[in-house]
Amino acid sequence: MAKKKSIISWIAYAATLVGFTTYVMLDTFVLPRVIDSDADKMNMSLFESQAPTENIQSGTESGTAAVTETLSTENSYKDENISIELKEYNAHATAIYVADVQLSSAQYLKTAFANDSYGRNIKDKTSSIAEDKNAVFAVNGDFYGARESGYVIRNGILYRSSGDSSADVLCIYADGSFAITNSKEKNAQELVDEGVWQAFSFGPALVEDGSVSVSEKDEVGKAMASNPRTAIGIIDELHYVFVVSDGRTSESEGLSLFELAQFMEGLGVNTAYNLDGGGSSSMYFNGKVINKPTTNGRSIKERSVSDIVYIGY
Amino acid sequence: MLFGAVYEHFSFGVYSNSMIYAFVPPMLTGIFLLFTGTREKVLEGRFILPLEMSAITLAVGSAAKGAIEIYGTDNRLLKWYWVAGGTLFAVTAVVYIFDTVHRKDK
């Protein structure tokens, strides 16, 4: 009788444990949880108090009768508000793609969620989200949907106010400037009130005040040393660089955070920040994926991500 | 070894302490029983069931956390493994102490 009772207890326990573990895994990786299905709003009021933007082609005020021509080639794009130039480098046995971006206003540095929805396990490829937004240029974002905490402020709207105390937060203000902070220093509402246009919670900060701010020992959570990487940096006013490196293949090993930080410092950035990397690292320009995204190094294909950073209208 | 091989294959060189040390709870339970002289009493008594369940729950929770960490993510539900494992361990301890006191009284 006691043995039978014990067997029943074990069966009930095993069923509960297996069932719960299955649910945890599905909740983590599969089951979509939409929190806001209308997450393509933009708080353009942040730009109302700003002076009229300057045409970056002619130096005159944008929207005037000056040059408004769009010039687009395989590795460059230029119109009155946006200038993008792509370059490819090879360093540390790694292919590195750099987009040099000059804007007339930070309102053209935008972000988007997969399916225009904020939540968990809502994912799409960087290129698909970029196409939906008619983006000229895009990279993957911070994959906010993989975590339960970390500020999410996108296009001036606050989506997640719970901070991740271990993560540096990159704030991009409406005037286009960058600042690195963390949840111990400022809460999310304070950042919104200060006029933060975009905030990312991944990191770490790679370069601060023009100097490398990571050591050779620093890594992202549990990541191995050499990886595909995505980073964003600011050189001076409204002048940015987006960097994506390939990795995990025999052709391109990948970069450590320190190598990435050194590379970005060499580009002359004042502040640089690491976004989600690994299989997420993707760069999109004029309808094409520029780099060779891979998760396992065996097949080249884009991983679906929660969000992108893009340049466009 | 099979567990290690699967882990190496899917981890892409990413490590997780939770995954590496997932076997610590059952190991500690075994060591505890071996060296405290309570092994026979526990194995014969009604303590073994919640004690084993506690160790397994913590081990599975640790491995699940490791698998989730390797993919750079987290989940709010993971805490329930520690709550359940801890509760089962507490139940074992309470029943064991109660039983010991009860036997002394006899």
Image (cartoon, coloured by chain):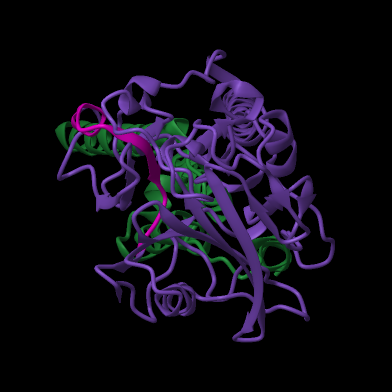
In the figure, A44 relative to A149: above or below?
above
Residue A310: name its quadrant. top right
- The answer to whether residue A35 of the structure is visible from this angle is yes
Residue visible at 61% across and 39% down?
A: A68
In the figure, B34 relative to A202: above or below?
below
In magenta segment, residue A195: yes
The chain letter corresponding to green is B
Image location (x, y in percent) of residue B8? 68, 68
- The answer to whether residue A124 of the structure is visible from this angle is no
Residue B104: name its quadrant. top left
Residue A298: name its quadrant. bottom right
In magenta segment, residue A25: no
Q: Quadrant of the C terminus of chain A?
A: top right
The chain letter corresponding to purple is A
Q: From the viewer's side, name the closer residue of A214 and A14.
A: A214
Image location (x, y in percent) of residue A56? 49, 49
Q: From the viewer's side, name the closer residue of A74 and A113.
A: A74
Q: Quadrant of the N terminus of chain A?
A: top right
Image location (x, y in percent) of residue A18? 64, 32
In the current view of this chain or complex, which residue is farthest to the right? A299
Q: Is residue A71 left or right of residue B55?
A: right
Residue visible at 59% across and 25% down?
A: A16
Image location (x, y in percent) of residue A22? 65, 32
Q: Is residue A279 left or right of residue A64?
A: right
Magenta residues?
Answer: A190-205
